[in-house]
């Protein structure tokens, strides 16, 4: 489980830091980490490419922290795959900034002899993206393809659920220590991934999920794989960072196309426009590698999976993953307009179709006083006692999912205003608060 130089690999990784180009140059010059550890300060100073910061770090010979990390890993059954380990992925060795080692919980896959595909995407997932991520990952897993992601909210988590439901292997690459669950709601998902696949990271135990860690983490998602599939993401999506790494590393890039007027499709459509392979189904990815991995791809499993790969909300709940979806500005407006038309029609029907222009003007000024979910007369009466801003927030709430206060920004409602309105609605029993700071209609 641990090679004879494991302690010195931990020491060297700690001294160089994550994604260090100097590490690769050092290990190319010296036989092993112990040879670097035993260098005298003047010998370190003679290395032409080593800067002052790293010289000072390599001159610190204390192994106390390395011993502490190694003890933690032994006590908690954390595997350590060092750069000198035969299991270390050969594709990572091709990177200009490979990790010195990887901490792993679960069964470390044979990355060197198996087709591995990274699946990444936006955290603000749509119903379209959710269904595609689940179906494609489910079918890839059924075809004996290892799916790698970052276990982030949205696409990453849904893809992992698809693999788990198919009984396949999935790998989550963390941007924190192996003992840190991030995001916190994914504790159950992380345990499930470790139980059937692997959770890995280059960061030592207790390393918090710092913002700077994730772009570096993304280079490993692409680096471990032959190809990366991007499912949904706007131009600022972190998934595009992984796409950039994939291109820089010479990996194949795939993207799921989307509607041209949706912000979630801006990134993926742009990737396709720039030369990424368009992926409409799992076969578009699998057939791309048939000539290399024909003997390891399970085509019978892929065929059988077609009857069971459709998205299931229960599969997400099983692993504690949110099934909430993001609605675009256009969708929110369309839903609001449809509800308004329905309410006007209901008002006219109730008054025997005699509503006049004066009634309509008054209606528009006061906004809706009846909930769009066709609520009870009691709900109507409660709403009528609330102010206009609170009624507006209620009427903007979708009927079939929970929302967070910041989602009302697209309709011109500030977060403070939304929180105030939602609190009043909860006090009056019209909405319920859920874990994660979200609210849903009763």
Image (spheres, helix red, strand yellow):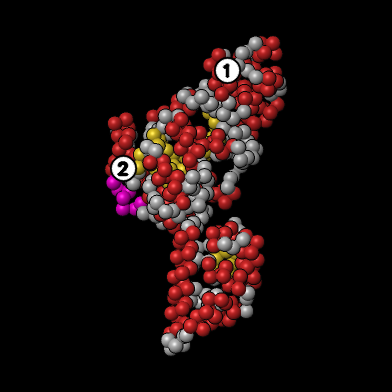
Residue 333 in percent (x, y) is at 48, 64
Per the image, is 343 magenta? no
2 shown above or below 316 = above
Q: Mark 1 and mark 2: span between their CA atoms?
A: 42 Å
The magenta segment is 302-309
Please tell me whether mark 1 sits on a helix, a strand or a loop. helix
307 to the left or right of 67: left
Q: Which of 135 and 230 is in front in this view?
A: 230
Asked if one can make out residue 322 in the rendered structure from this viewpoint, the answer is yes
- For disc 1, the neighbor class at 10 Å (few under 14, some 14 to 19, many from 20) is some
Task: Name the mark on residue 26.
Answer: 1
Task: Name the mark on residue 283.
Answer: 2
91 to the left or right of 206: left
Number of numbered tags placed on the structure image = 2
Residue 364 in percent (x, y) is at 53, 76
Q: Which residue is rendered at x = 69% and y = 10% of the image?
A: 42
Q: Nearer the viewer, residue 261 or 105?
A: 261
Q: Quadrant where the C terminus lies?
A: bottom right
Task: Name the mark on residue 172.
Answer: none
Residue 9 in percent (x, y) is at 59, 23
314 shown above or below 371 = above
Q: Which residue is rendered at x = 48% and y = 47% of the image?
A: 234
Badge 1 vs badge 2, beta-carbon distance below 8 Å: no
Q: Which residue is rendered at x = 42% and y = 29% of the image?
A: 250
Residue 10 in percent (x, y) is at 61, 26
330 shown above or below 71 = below
Q: Earlier in the sequence, mark 1 or mark 2?
A: 1
Asked if one can make out residue 157 in the rendered structure from this viewpoint, the answer is no
Please tell me whether mark 2 sits on a helix, a strand or a loop. helix
- For disc 2, the neighbor class at 10 Å (few under 14, some 14 to 19, many from 20) is some
Q: Which residue is rendered at x = 48% and y = 40% of the image?
A: 240
Q: Quadrant where the N terminus lies?
A: top right
């Amino acid at each position: 489980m641990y090679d004879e130089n494991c302690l010195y690999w931990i020491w060297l990784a700690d001294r160089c830091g994550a994604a260090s180009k100097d590490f690769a140059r050092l290990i190319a010059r010296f036989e092993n980490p112990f040879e670097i550890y035993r260098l005298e300060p003047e010998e370190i100073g003679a290395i032409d490419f080593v800067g002052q910061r790293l010289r000072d770090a390599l001159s610190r010979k204390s192994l106390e922290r390395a011993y502490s990390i190694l003890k933690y890993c032994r006590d908690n059954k954390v595997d350590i795959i060092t750069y000198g380990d035969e299991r270390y992925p050969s594709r990572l060795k091709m990177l200009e900034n490979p990790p010195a080692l990887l901490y792993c919980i679960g069964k470390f896959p044979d990355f060197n002899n198996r087709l591995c595909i990274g699946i990444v995407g936006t955290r603000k997932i749509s119903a379209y993206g959710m269904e595609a991520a689940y179906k494609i990952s489910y079918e890839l897993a059924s075809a004996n393809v290892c799916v790698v992601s970052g276990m982030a909210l949205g696409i990453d988590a849904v893809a992992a659920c698809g693999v788990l439901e198919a009984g396949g292997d999935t790998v989550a690459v963390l941007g924190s220590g192996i003992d840190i669950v991030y995001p916190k709601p994914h504790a159950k998902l992380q345990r499930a991934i470790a139980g059937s696949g692997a959770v890995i990271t280059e960061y030592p135990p207790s390393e918090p999920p710092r913002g700077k860690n994730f772009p570096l983490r993304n280079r490993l998602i692409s680096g471990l794989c032959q190809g990366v599939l991007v499912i949904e993401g706007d131009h600022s999506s972190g998934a595009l960072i992984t796409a950039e790494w994939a291109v820089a590393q010479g990996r194949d890039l795939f993207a799921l196309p989307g509607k041209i007027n949706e912000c979630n499709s801006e990134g993926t459509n742009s990737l396709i426009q720039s030369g990424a392979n368009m992926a409409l189904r799992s076969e578009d990815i699998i057939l791309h590698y048939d000539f290399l991995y024909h003997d390891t791809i399970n085509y019978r499993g892929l065929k059988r999976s077609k009857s069971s790969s459709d998205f299931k909300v229960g599969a997400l709940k099983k692993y504690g993953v949110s099934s909430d979806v993001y609605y675009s500005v256009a969708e929110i407006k369309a839903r609001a307009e449809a509800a308004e038309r329905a309410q006007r029609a209901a008002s006219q029907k109730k008054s025997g179709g005699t509503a006049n222009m004066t009634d309509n003007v008054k209606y528009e000024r006061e906004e809706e006083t009846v909930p769009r979910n066709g609520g009870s007369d009691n709900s109507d009466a409660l709403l009528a006692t609330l102010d206009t801003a609170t009624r507006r927030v209620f009427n903007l709430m979708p009927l079939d999912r929970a929302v967070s206060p910041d989602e009302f920004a697209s309709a011109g409602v500030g977060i403070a205003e939304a929180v105030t309105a939602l609190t009043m609605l909860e006090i009056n029993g019209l909405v319920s608060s859920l874990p994660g700071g979200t609210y849903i209609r009763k």
